Image (cartoon, rainbow, N blue to C red):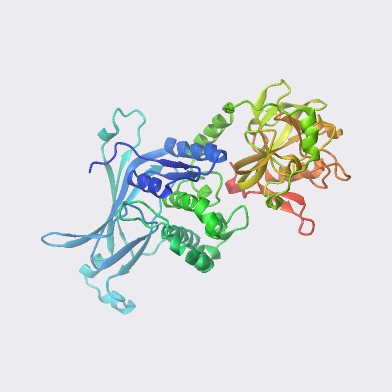
């Protein structure tokens, strides 16, 4: 069969998917598969997908290894529909083994690394026999490698006309290497994780990956032992730490162990998330801002980073989608009744990782009366407050997954304990007590800090027709719903955000909140290591 005229990438949106089929199609087309659980992840997934395309150096890349039958070489990693086993090529004079490995696209500034297990076909090669090897035996340890690829050109009239290019090299596999122990441990662990997770989704006779539901409990029980044996656990560099964080780190990380910890998690989102995660590591591409492991890829590529930043800015400046149906605003009487009749509180809200935040699509009113999504706020932008115009000082952006947000008044999505006012700023309450419904949310949530002002009323923004309190409002004690010993302290909040580090637009990349071990109240912010920040 002739190769496809272009690389094929697939995306799965929502939870009613055949992710195994989408994964197989991407493998067949030498592309990538990415899972988008909900609207909150659309931006980050497509921003990274397009940035990877824009920074592509070559397509249809494959690596062919030719070696002696006295060697056994195994590629450690995921199982795919295009993965090949070693085959024997026999000529009149010699016999050679050949192993072909499909690589797909190659990106500028990003290495592609394979972990291979090599051993002699004999049971064991004694050290004492090295000096007595014949020239023929010595040559049996040499591997000839050929890289084939097609250069990526945006102005090609037809991609099929691009010539195939090759590069060749030879290496004795028993020679020493200058690769550090930490680097070897990282790639070995990365390959082992891909192999481990891939075994949960074997390729069926029809070529579709299907989750083996009968073994889910077995993998859950053995995950701790698997993690304890990974070489990455013995190293403290960013790459190895990122693998362990994804595997069994504290929330909001540890998504691998969480995905198979319960049958309900596995059946709802684990069967879609895990193939997408494996694809990112197998292809060595950054596919979102979410997981620490894939975030390691592309950090050494100025082209990828530049493309990602430009695309991210473009996405943030898109106009918000228009609602299909107009939602009538609540009357004052209805608002009062809703505040009086408290809805039952879902205790899951107490475990929110983000603290007090708004969903990125939340409409916020500027001083000019223009309405923009809150994700577009930057330092210096003037917003409307109950006392007039105030400038934005900093914006805290935090990624959450499967977080419970409250829907208030139709278009406001906010964390349960972020104080809001439904009566023009006269009284304040919590969304958890007045919300219309709980909404599962995955994506970025935002908190805003305005310029310093001694008047607590000046620390609020108009969001979806409601007043929402901002960070550092000045109320640290008392019965006011806004009162908070940390979030109300302008100096402590400002110091915490500065320590995390803001970009040139005043946006801080958050990782969650720190909570007091005794009271459970927020007492600080959690940030990313410097490597993870844009």
Say if residue 382 shows up in the picture.
yes
Residue 479 relative to residue 18: left or right: right
| x, y percent for residue 213 | 45, 60
Q: Quadrant of the C terminus?
A: top right
Nearest to the observer: residue 144 or residue 123:
123
Asked if residue 52 lies left or right of residue 510, the reply is: left
Image quadrant containing the N terminus: top left
Left or right of 518: which side holds 170?
Answer: left
- Residue that lies at the very extreme toward the top in this rendered image: 368
Q: Does residue 243 show up?
A: no
Residue placed furthest toward the left: 92
Question: Which of the 4 image quadrants contains residue 447?
Answer: top right
Q: Is residue 48 above or below residue 24?
A: above
Q: Position of residue 269 (x, y in %)?
A: 52, 50
Q: Which of the pair 210/30 is nearer the observer?
A: 210
Between 137 and 526, which is closer to the camera in this rendering?
526
- Residue 425, image x and y in percent? 82, 31
Q: Is residue 167 above or below residue 214?
A: above
The quarter of the displayed image where residue 115 is located: bottom left
Q: Residue at x 46, y 49 (%)?
A: 276
**At 22% from the left edge and 72% from the top edge, which residue is drawn?**
134
Vertical placement of residue 453 versus 138, above or below: above
Q: Is residue 129 left or right of residue 447?
A: left
* Residue 233 in picture, x, y percent from top left: 54, 64
């Amino acid at each position: 069969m002739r190769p496809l005229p272009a690389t094929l990438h697939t995306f799965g949106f929502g939870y009613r998917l055949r992710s195994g089929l989408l994964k197989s199609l991407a493998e067949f087309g030498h592309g990538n598969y990415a899972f988008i659980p909900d609207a909150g992840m659309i931006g980050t997934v497509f921003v990274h997908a397009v940035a990877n395309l824009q920074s592509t150096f070559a397509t249809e890349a494959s690596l062919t290894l030719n070696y002696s039958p006295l060697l056994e070489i195994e590629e450690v990693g995921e199982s795919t529909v295009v993965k090949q086993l070693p085959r024997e090529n026999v000529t009149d004079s010699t016999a050679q083994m050949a192993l072909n490995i499909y690589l797909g696209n190659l990106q500028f500034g990003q290495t592609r690394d394979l972990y291979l297990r090599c051993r002699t076909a004999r049971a064991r090669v004694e050290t004492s026999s090295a000096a007595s090897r014949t020239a023929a035996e010595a040559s049996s340890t040499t591997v000839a490698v050929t890289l084939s690829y097609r250069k990526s050109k945006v102005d090609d009239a037809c991609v099929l006309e691009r010539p195939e290019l090759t590069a060749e090299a030879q290496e004795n596999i028993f020679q020493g290497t200058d690769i550090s122990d930490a680097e070897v441990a990282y790639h070995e662990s990365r390959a082992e994780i891909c192999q481990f997770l891939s075994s949960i989704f074997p390729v069926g006779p029809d070529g579709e990956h299907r989750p083996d539901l009968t073994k889910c409990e077995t993998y859950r029980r053995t995950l701790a032992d698997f993690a304890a044996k990974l070489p990455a656990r013995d190293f403290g560099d960013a790459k190895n730490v990122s693998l362990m964080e994804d595997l069994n780190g504290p929330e909001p990380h540890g998504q691998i162990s969480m995905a198979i910890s319960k049958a309900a998690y596995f059946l709802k989102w684990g069967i879609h998330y895990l193939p997408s995660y494996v694809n990112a590591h197998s292809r060595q591409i950054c596919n979102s801002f979410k997981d620490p492991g894939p975030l390691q890829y592309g950090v050494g590529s100025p082209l990828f980073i530049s493309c990602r930043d430009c695309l991210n800015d473009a996405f943030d400046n898109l106009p918000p989608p228009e609602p299909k149906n107009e939602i009538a605003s609540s009357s004052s009487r209805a608002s009062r009744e809703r505040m009086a009749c408290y809805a039952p509180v879902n205790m899951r809200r107490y475990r929110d990782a983000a603290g007090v935040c708004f969903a990125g699509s939340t409409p916020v009113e500027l001083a000019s009366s223009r309405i923009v999504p809150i994700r577009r706020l930057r330092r210096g932008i003037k917003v409307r407050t109950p006392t007039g115009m105030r400038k934005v000082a900093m914006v805290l952006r935090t990624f959450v997954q499967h977080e419970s947000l409250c829907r208030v008044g139709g278009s406001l999505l906010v964390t349960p304990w972020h104080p809001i006012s439904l009566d023009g700023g006269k009284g304040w309450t919590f969304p958890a007590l007045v919300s219309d419904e709980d909404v599962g949310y995955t994506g970025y949530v935002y908190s805003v800090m305005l310029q310093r002002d001694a008047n607590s009323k000046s620390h609020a923004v108009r969001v979806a027709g409601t007043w929402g309190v901002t960070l550092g409002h000045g109320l640290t004690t008392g019965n006011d719903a806004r009162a908070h010993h940390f979030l109300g302290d302008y100096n402590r909040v400002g110091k915490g955000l500065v320590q995390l580090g803001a970009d040139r637009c005043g946006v801080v990349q958050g990782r969650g909140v720190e909570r007091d071990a005794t009271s459970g109240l927020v007492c600080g912010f959690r940030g990313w290591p410097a490597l993870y920040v844009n």
